[in-house]
Image (cartoon, helix red, strand yellow):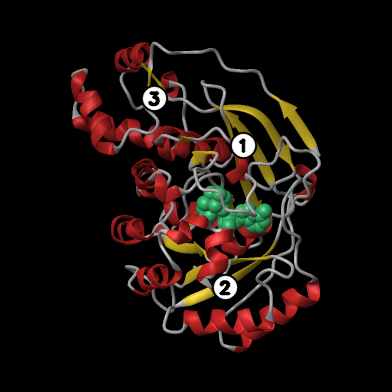
Amino acid sequence: MDDVILPAPAADAARKNLIGLSREELLAEMASIGAAPFRANQLWHWIYHRGVTDFAAMTSLAKSFREQLAEAYVVGRPEVSRALASIDGTRKWLLRFPDGQEIETVHIPEDDRGTLCVSSQVGCTLTCKFCHTGTQRLVRNLDAAEIVGQIMVARDGLQEWPLAAEARPPRPAGPRPSEQEAEDRQLTNIVMMGMGEPLYNFEAVAKALRIVMDHEGLSISKRKITLSTSGIVPMIERCGAELGVNLAISLHAVRNDLRDELVPINKKYPIAELLAACRTYPGSSNARRITFEYVMLKGVNDSPAEARELVRLLRGIPAKVNLIPFNPWPGAPYECSSNAAIKAFSDIVFEAGYSSPVRTPRGQDIMAACGQLKSDSIKQRRSEILRAAAEAPL
Ligand code: SAH
Ligand code: SF4
């Protein structure tokens, strides 16, 4: 395990951060200092395609313009207070914002992809009974810069910004560079499965994901992005229509009385309404299935009868199921189901024609479970969730 404590960067309240501005906002910002629209496009390329943070290195811009930019703006990054690397390759960054609040971002490498688990809020206003994040008292939304910043920090840490054009060997004939680069990337997929409920911070999440999806920048396609929600029904349609990303639903129970207890937002948006929103989710198909997350809680929701009911409920929805062994935390009112119970549950779901993988933990030595870095006694299993989404055939 490799634990690096990094120094805090100098505070810079006087200069505006360009990260997190939409393309339109960047254009308007440049117009306000008298720069032509193509300058904003060049800047976008330097910031989001090349990952450059120093205006002086943006060599396609006139020197005087670079100086002008450096006086008024920064290309910021969240402060990385800790960076951890697991022996299995999982990496984790603990990020601290100027108000002292902290969140985590986790990268899980696999043979054919690398997935980043991104947070949408500090803490969460919802109080799912099995979730440690839900016990945190302090909650605030992240803004678009703080969400995009998580991806920028990961790209920095993974050192996978494209080489500066001048350092690149001549390009052989073949696929366009963007395709070639995409194949080699370690950060190919994003899951909104860190701290927070992304559909309770939709505007900032949407703005951030539009920046992430932009073809001339980070260029991560909507097919490689999965948003996980506890079931904020009125926002599900908007998520599909406006962003078109993959959807994951934290179902966890097949009866309203139990789901009311485990995922209390169910009292507002019960199972039938939630599944109706899934049935009409824009863009879902057999090739792009909705993931149903189901945390395995011993003696609570893990019986064969519940597995059969799950299959019945999902009928007609292009679905796949991710079974997540419960990750215990001190004071948690539940235990994880036995391996035998998980296997029996998984078999029933699988035999009904749904993929139902059960995940092995990743990054346990660095406590890769989101939101739990500071609790040393907590066993780390939540990275399984990330892996579950990472393995989804997108
Ligand atoms: N708020 C969103 C996304 C963040 S939580 C949501 O609830 O979907 C990501 C996933 O982790 C959810 O499926 C959540 O139910 C699950 N989860 C939370 N705490 C867990 C724990 N202790 N063990 C296993 N899974 C957990
Ligand atoms: Fe919030 Fe998701 Fe945790 Fe529920 S499971 S408390 S919605 S982060």
Q: Is residue 372 left or right of residue 285?
A: right
**Secondary element type, mark 2:** strand
308 or 317: nearer the eye? 308
Residue farthest to the front, as pictured: 257
Q: Residues within 10 Å of mark 1 (few under 14, many from 20)?
A: some
Mark found first going from the N terminus, 1 or 2: 1
Count of marks, rendered view:
3
Mark 1 vs mark 2: in front: 2
Mark found first going from the N terminus, 1 or 3: 3
Q: Check disc 3 and give the amino acid type.
A: Thr
| Residue at the image position 48 percent from the left and 80 percent from the top | 313
Q: Check disc 1 and give the amino acid type.
A: Gly
Residue 59 - label: 3
Q: Is residue 134 left or right of residue 182?
A: right
Name the spot of residue 112 as percent of width and height, x first.
Answer: 61, 63
Q: Label 2, on which residue?
A: 321
| Residue at the image position 73 percent from the left and 74 percent from the top | 342
Q: Quadrant of residue 271?
A: bottom left
Vertical arrangement, residue 341 with respect to residue 138, above or below? below
**Secondary element type, mark 1:** helix
Q: Check disc 2 and give the amino acid type.
A: Val
208 or 331: nearer the eye? 331
Name the spot of residue 144 as percent of width and height, x first.
Answer: 40, 36
Q: Label 1, on which residue?
A: 157
| Residue at the image position 65 percent from the left and 18 percent from the top | 7
Q: Quadrant of residue 373?
A: top right
Mark 3 vs mark 2: in front: 2
The reply to whether residue 190 is in sight is: no
Q: Is residue 306 left or right of residue 222?
A: right
